[in-house]
Image (cartoon, coloured by chain):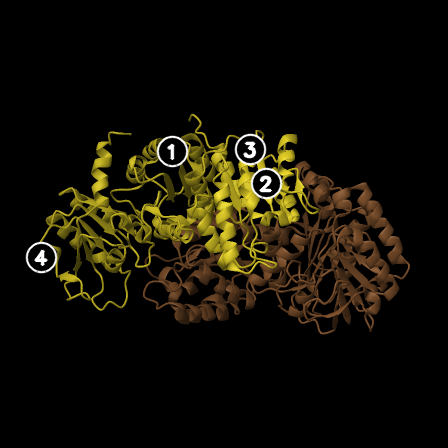
Chain colours: A brown, B yellow
Amino acid sequence: MYEKSDHFKQIDPLFHPRSIAVVGESSSGKIGPGFLEAHINQGFSGKLYAINPKGQVKNYETYPTLAEVPGPVDHVVISVRAEFLKQVIEDCVKKKVRSAAMFTSGFREWEGERGAEKEAEILVMAQKSGLRLIGPNCMGFYCPDSGLSYRTDMPTLKNGKISIISQSGGVAMTPVYAAAEMGMGFAKSISYGNEVDLGAVDFLSYLAEDPDTQVICMYIEGTRQGDALRTAMKKAASAKPLLVIKGGRTDSGSRAVVSHTGAMAGSHRMWEAVCRQTGAILVNDIGEMLDVAKLALFSKKPAGRRMGIVSVSGGLGVMFTDLFTLNGFEVPKFSESLRNDLKQWVDLPGTSIRNPLDMATAFFSMGTHPQLFTRLGQADNLDIIVVVLAMEYLGSGNMPGGEVTNYFLHVLADSFDKVEKPLVVIFPETTKAKDRLDMERFLIRRGYPVFPDVARCAKALNHVLNNSPQEA
Amino acid sequence: MYEKSDHFKQIDPLFHPRSIAVVGESSSGKIGPGFLEAHINQGFSGKLYAINPKGQVKNYETYPTLAEVPGPVDHVVISVRAEFLKQVIEDCVKKKVRSAAMFTSGFREWEGERGAEKEAEILVMAQKSGLRLIGPNCMGFYCPDSGLSYRTDMPTLKNGKISIISQSGGVAMTPVYAAAEMGMGFAKSISYGNEVDLGAVDFLSYLAEDPDTQVICMYIEGTRQGDALRTAMKKAASAKPLLVIKGGRTDSGSRAVVSHTGAMAGSHRMWEAVCRQTGAILVNDIGEMLDVAKLALFSKKPAGRRMGIVSVSGGLGVMFTDLFTLNGFEVPKFSESLRNDLKQWVDLPGTSIRNPLDMATAFFSMGTHPQLFTRLGQADNLDIIVVVLAMEYLGSGNMPGGEVTNYFLHVLADSFDKVEKPLVVIFPETTKAKDRLDMERFLIRRGYPVFPDVARCAKALNHVLNNSPQEA
């Protein structure tokens, strides 16, 4: 992937406009999505214009029409009512704008066939000057590195490595917020709506080559280009992990899709088969998608399914051993030699060193952790180390609150660094959920995937372990 | 259940001791579980004594031996090393103590057969005076109404309606913390450990009759009284929902059980059958247990599987419709007459009124909510109303932060009150997770079960809907 394709060279500049105009931002400033402010919050460093014939928009540089903007305009965000869209596109064509993201809705998804005809007219107009269209009925582009955004409160984390393309605006936003909550950024989020011009196939092919994207997520409701999409999915999935949520897999869901983006949904089984054949990973919801992304970003693929479980609680150790086993993993007995070594650090009533390693109070002998985890990482019959944390044990008893807990977490993370195997953390949301969130962020920043329960961890690991494309 | 059994009359007083002595609390006060402080924090209003031959324990009323305590001692908590346990039990017998909870470990679970023999000796001694034993290797009793507790930071919520019995101390605590985090209290938590005397059968039978307990949870690793336990489970499950986590259902989990409580585990299939036959609900982990408890406490059992879904986001509406359908629920099209009524309140591009009801921006027309939800609750072809919330839509756009959001939540809850059907809320943990937790607590206090995703909601609903005991 040293030489980029022509397709990549066409699309990539759209994410790096030198100037942006927003058409239809309210002059009163009372209601509206706030595209102008969103770009400012995201640190957009180019020229930013408000277009409004009714007068000044707040303190933005405002012009009545696009034609009157003095310099060039690379990208336009359109937020006018449906009946005015055509005029704005005409203005974009005259101004030789490169791309337009159409937030405006009320086409195919609202009026069916009649809406689709209006979309087709717009496309014909745009093609006169090579204007590329995103939408209508979409949020457009979010790209923190170049300062693109579509909501005022979108996260501003830079250098994220996940990207998403989504037919739904909501599903383009929600994963970005959710990932940021854990301290993980997105490289790009692309909400493409009714795809009158650019759509899933174009953006998927682009992201497959995008050096800033390490994991691709896709939310799709339907497509009018089945074969091309399959080819694009295959290409993308062979380049990097491709995680897919398919909206409208069931009859009822499919009925909902028609009202939502006017797409044809296609059956559940068909989409399962397409994902299997292309090597894409079909996930059920946003949480599952981010769980797999987290694993894919942080952990090399485990060599197998044999787990070493480290726990501070006997009951949780037992329960989690059961659940991983029921989910297709093995929790093999530690070798004689490993147990002999572990005895140096864990040897008290209440502890157990067979696997799970139930450390009980030995969990708080912080000095022993680096050696203990180094040794666990060397075990021949283990492929993954699972560490079970629990807020009710951290910072508990006579440990005076947060400071010790933070020190303890640092010691833990330093010890995890010594494990030369994939390591995952299960950190249930029980007590002190707000503190837990800070600790989860810390561990994720240190590169360790954290899950709230075994079910989610096992599901994500199973996706990663089972994923290998089959021939169609 | 107007006339209580003799068994109930024997056990119930153990939860209402007039005086408690703690043996083995460190005089230096540096290390130790803090049973004395735990009882004070929980508001225990009887007499509380520290027993320590080495001198004063902090500023507690301290005596060198039990014999020297001036008044009667109803309950003793024993936290001495294993080799001193026998002597303390002898003192309890002489003092005519009613019950002793033995935190002390290092018996069956640590020394196997030899430990079991020591336990048997203790039992023989206790029976001389009718002293009832809990443990060893247990945390004992937590009962906020009477001020019993075993950890200094245990929640102090009164009038909780869930109770748990657990062979594991950790699993006796964790659900209590987790429920309190959501504002739900526990009536009793009983950690019974190696059950030398009182154990699962006794406490289960007791809770079946306990008027303070509406839902019974049980974590069990193994039993030496299979038939009696089955009978007790059947009796309990016919009185109220009985939710069971079985530790050691797999070979690996079972190996872990031996090290943890020295019990024999029994196979996965056997426990599945026992739960099915007795009408108990077998759940996988603590989260699932609390999910089912939440539903059982708050919602009457739905009449069927037909859902009406209300969402503010089209993509989430589609996705959740799919997931509920894939989990065995129906999302039927709204009737003609319902849709005609809904049009009054929801009729804009971006909305849809077919089911899911995709309200988009109409979600924020708060004035219409009471009528809209009243009408939804009257729909003939719906059994459950599902409301999908999402933090990224609440308090977003131009709504100025928390105050509007709180007002909005109050309006929502007032409108939910008008729905004469079970109503559940899905409130994903995406952005602003810390704020979300406060809102979840508010909705739960108002009596509405909240779930973080469809998978957990569907699983809990399926447990409740499928649960009807079969003949053995």
Whichever of callouts 1 and 2 sits on the residue coming sooner in the sequence is 1
Quadrant where the image shows the C terminus of chain B: top left
Rounded to the nearest angstrom, the CA distance separating label 3 from label 1 is 23 Å
User: Farthest right residue?
Assistant: A128
The chain containing the residue under callout 2 comes to B
> In the picture provided, is B159 more to the left or to the right than A171?
left
Q: Quick check: marks 3 and 4 in contact, CB under 8 Å? A: no
Between circles 4 and 1, the one closer to the viewer is 1
Q: Answer whether labels 4 and 1 touch (C-beta < 8 Å).
A: no
Using the image, name the chain to which the residue with label 1 belongs.
B
The amino acid at mark 4 is: Glu
Disc 4 residue crowd, few under 14, some 14–19, many 20+, Cα 10 Å: few
Q: Secondary structure at mark 3?
A: loop
Cα distance, mark 4 to mark 1?
45 Å
Numbered tag placed on residue B305 in the rendering: 3
Task: Say which amino acid is labelled 3.
Answer: Arg
* Circle 3 chain: B
- The amino acid type, in three-letter code, at marker 2 is Ile
Quickly name the residue at label 2: B309
Q: Nearer the viewer, mark 3 or mark 4?
A: 3
Is the residue under label 1 in contact with that under label 3 (CB below 8 Å)? no
**Residue tagged 4:** B68
Judge if badges 2 and 4 mark residues of a common chain. Answer: yes
**Residue at 49 percent of width and 61 percent of height:** A437
| Badge 3 density bin: few <14, some 14–19, many ≥20, Cα 10 Å | many
How far is disc 2 from disc 3 in space, using C-alphas? 12 Å
Question: Where is A115 relative to B62, above or below?
Answer: above
Mark with earlier residue (3, 4) = 4
- In this rendering, which labeled residue sits more in front, label 2 or label 4? 2
Residue A399 lies, with reference to residue B178, above or below; the image says below
Q: Earlier in the sequence, mark 4 or mark 1?
A: 4
| Residue highlighted by disc 1 | B237
